[in-house]
Image (spheres, rainbow, N blue to C red):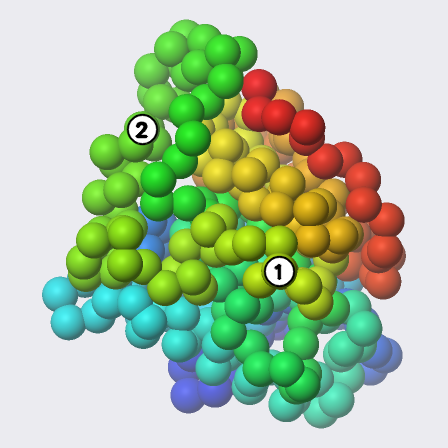
Amino acid sequence: MSWTSQAEGLIRFYDTAAADAPRPALLWLHGGGFAGGSIDMPEADAVARGLAARGIAVASVDYRLAGPGTRYPAPSDDAVAAWHWFAAHLEALHLDPSRTAIGGASAGGNLAAGALLRLPHPGPRPAAAVLAYPTLLAVQPLPGPALRAALDADPDADRFGPDVVRAMYEGFLGGPVERAPLAAVPGTASPEDLAGYPPVLMVNGDVDELRVSGEHFARLLHAAGRPVLVHLEPGTTHGHLNRPGEAAFGATLERIAAYLHGLPVTAVTGLPVAHA
């Protein structure tokens, strides 16, 4: 596995050992609440290295972080620009367009999901999306009784209550969430907005309040007739891809790699009927 800086530093490209045959690829965006994280954190670097070792080429995006002078759409613009660069270089990099996806973790999952709502039709589009414990709603439904009990039993995991999530989005937007553009809060989409959305693999944390927004988005995709596979990683709290020492880290990478190697996907499976 090797990596190189591309697109004037916007992308760090991690190649696979077998770089001479068309292979699956993933444009990946790390998390960090829109205002933190980096391409050196495990959720970016260790994930990219782990997927490259499993035969998936990864382009990790060093997007601008939200803060004074940098609000939406700047991080989203970087995600869209990174995709356009990646799509234009797939052939030169010997990557398979039919098995090339966009994805991200937590806030990066939001940016990936939102970028898909901004990419033009027609035009080169990802063959799939990979969303790991994404945040997709600024105002979340309350967790169901089972998840609420699990969060109460693990105070360290109970980090994403309504006020925290709203404040995170207000920092991202630089203003009230009620005026947020659709691509900034993809969970507010209608089924009509999601027509033409690619197949989605979603991996949610077990004891993680953000799982509610992910499951909500999965139901929207299902209503739109889009292929979506939702997996709940047992025993995990939010951010397990940032903790390579946990068994769930490797299990999720295996799941993502198998999904990308197996594209195209058409079946709608593994959809939660309601959040627990």
Residue 54 in the image, given as x and y percentages of width and height: 75, 56
Task: Give the mark, 2 or 1, whose residue is nearer the N terminus.
Answer: 2
Residue 9 in which image quadrant = bottom left
Q: Is residue 263 left or right of residue 85?
A: right
Crowd class of label 1 (few under 14; some 14 to 19; many from 20; radius 10 Å): few
User: Mark 1 = which residue?
Assistant: 192
- Residue found 61% across the figure and 65% down from its top: 102
Residue type at mark 2: give it.
Answer: Gly
| Foreground tag (2 vs 1) | 1
Q: Is residue 270 above or below residue 60?
A: above
Residue 23 in which image quadrant = bottom right
Image mark for residue 51: none
Crowd class of label 2 (few under 14; some 14 to 19; many from 20; radius 10 Å): some
Residue at mark 2 to residue at mark 1: CA–CA distance? 29 Å
Quarter of the image with the N terminus in it: bottom right
Q: Is residue 117 visible?
A: yes
Quarter of the image with the C terminus in it: top right
Circle 1: element type: helix
- Residue found 68% across the figure and 71% down from its top: 126
Q: Nearer the viewer, residue 93 or 135?
A: 135
User: Mark 2 = which residue?
Assistant: 161
Q: Is residue 40 visible?
A: no
- Residue found 49% across the figure and 49% down from its top: 187
- Residue found 45% across the figure and 9% down from its top: 149
Residue 58 in which image quadrant = bottom right
Residue type at mark 1: give it.
Answer: Glu
Q: Is residue 74 left or right of residue 188?
A: left
Residue 206 in the image, given as x and y percentages of width and height: 56, 25
Q: Nearer the viewer, residue 151 or 120?
A: 120
| Dot 2 and dot 1 residues touching (CB under 8 Å) | no
Residue 49 in the image, given as x and y percentages of width and height: 60, 58
